[in-house]
Image (cartoon, rainbow, N blue to C red):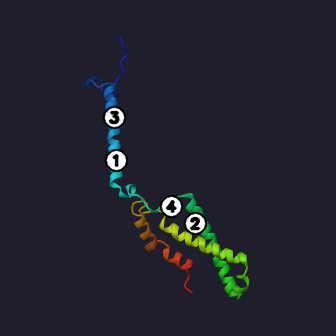
Amino acid sequence: MKNKVAPADGAEGKGEGIGEDEDDLDKDVKQLKDAIALKLTLSQDMIKPRRFIIKSSTSEFLNNFEYLVMILAIWNAIWTPLTIGFDQANVIGQGVAFFCMDLFVDLVFTIDIILGFTSSYVDTANGAEIFAPKLIAMHYIFKGSFFIDFMSTFPIS
């Protein structure tokens, strides 16, 4: 007498055995593959080749870069009034170190603007992270800090 394996889910009297469970599993796998394929074809942003590399807003690099931007903004908030207020801008600003520091600050602020256009954002309506370049640009310009970033990087004299 051979050992009989009991079918799953109480299907003893229905004539279902192990082979049919494998068929059900294959059907489930096929349905899952079809669902994934459908989602991929519906999502045009995932299929279109991108000209830009979009960085996730939750990346460690972007978080560290924002810390650098904040430190340099504090530097500017202290340094600029001191040099202008005490009329020492020409005397102190002639040094190579301060010239290089100002150049570095301007470069980092310019990179911050570029990253603003190439970093995803989280949509507040549904909580989804948005990676579409056009939506990111529109969000950064109209709802983000583009105007403030632009005016602080390229001041009008």
- How far apart marks 4 and 1 lie (CA) works out to 26 Å
Residue closest to the eye, 23 or 98: 98
Earlier sequence position, callout 3 versus callout 4: 3
Circle 2 residues within 10 Å: few <14, some 14–19, many ≥20: few
On the image, the x and y values in percent for residue 17 come to 31, 24
In the picture as drawn, the residue positioned furthest to the left comes out as: 14
On the image, the x and y values in percent for residue 35 come to 33, 46
Depth check, mark 4 against mark 1: the one in front is 1
- How far apart marks 3 and 1 lie (CA) works out to 16 Å
Residue closest to the eye, 24 or 134: 134
- How far apart marks 4 and 2 lie (CA) works out to 11 Å
Helix, strand or loop at label 2? It is helix
Earlier sequence position, callout 1 versus callout 2: 1
Q: Does residue 43 appear left or right of residue 104 in this picture?
A: left
The residue to which callout 4 is attached is 57
- How far apart marks 1 and 2 lie (CA) works out to 37 Å
Dot 3 and dot 4 residues touching (CB under 8 Å)? no
**Mark seen at residue 66:** 2
Residue at x 72%, y 77% (from the top left corner):
96
- How far apart marks 3 and 4 lie (CA) works out to 38 Å
Circle 3 residues within 10 Å: few <14, some 14–19, many ≥20: few
Residue at x 39%, y 55% (from the top left corner):
46
Helix, strand or loop at label 3? It is helix
Circle 1 residues within 10 Å: few <14, some 14–19, many ≥20: few
On the image, the x and y values in percent for residue 41 come to 33, 52
Depth check, mark 3 against mark 1: the one in front is 1
Snapshot quadrant of residue 132: bottom left
**Mark seen at residue 37:** 1
- How far apart marks 3 and 2 lie (CA) works out to 48 Å
For residue 140, above or below residue 49: below
On the image, the x and y values in percent for residue 131 come to 43, 60
Residue at x 62%, y 67% (from the top left corner):
68
